[in-house]
Image (cartoon, grey):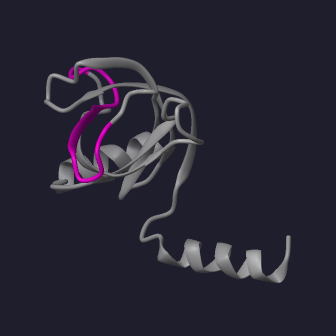
Amino acid sequence: MTAREGEYLTHYEEKRRYPRATVIDLYVRWGTTPECEHDGDQVTSLSLGGCFLVTEREAESGETVFIRLWEASTPGGLYQGVVRYQLQLSDPLPPIGLGVEFVEMGEEDRERLEGVME
């Protein structure tokens, strides 16, 4: 890694408001409505501020999405977020994921998410 790359990584990490947890096998339901019409996609990075959702489905930057970490009867909960970016290696390949920022999170949701991250 060059000094310039190191400077970029440090600058990027300093912009994060919340520490990220790398997660394994966290499959979710998600969609543009609270019913979360898509399933079988995976979250690989999670924080109180948002997550990275591995999916080939497309979404527009600024679009509202809902992510259910588990079914409603278990502790994961339903979270509302905004798509901040769609990651795509190149056109015409399908996207490989979405960066989602959580919004409108209450204290109970925040505590539940902290429990998931632990």
Query: Does 103 sit above or below residue 57?
Result: below
Assess whether residue 61 is covered by the magenta stretch: yes
Q: Where is residue 91 in the image (x, y as percent from the top left)?
A: 53, 38
Q: On the rendered image, what quadrant is the N terminus found in?
A: bottom right
Q: Is residue 12 left or right of residue 104?
A: right
Dominant SS type (magenta): loop
Q: Position of residue 107 (x, y in %)?
A: 19, 56
Query: Does 107 sit above or below residue 74?
Result: below
Q: In this view, does 11 lie to the left or right of 70?
A: right
Assess whether residue 102 is covered by the magenta stretch: no
Q: Where is residue 60 in the image (x, y as percent from the top left)?
A: 28, 44
Residue drawn at x 37%, y 52% is 50
Q: Can residue 118 be seen in this view?
A: no
Q: In this view, does 14 lie to the left or right of 103?
A: right
Judging depth in this view, the residue of 26 and 63 nearest the camera is 63
Residue drawn at x 15%, y 22% is 35
Residue drawn at x 29%, y 28% is 30
Q: Can residue 88 be seen in this view?
A: yes
Q: In this view, does 12 lie to the left or right of 102?
A: right
Q: Position of residue 72 (x, y in %)?
A: 21, 23
- Most extreme residue toward the front is 92
Question: In the rendered image, which quarter is residue 68 located in?
Answer: top left
Query: Does 113 sit above or below residue 38?
Result: below
Residue drawn at x 19%, y 33% is 32
What residue span does the magenta drawing correspond to? 59-73
Judging depth in this view, the residue of 1 and 72 nearest the camera is 1
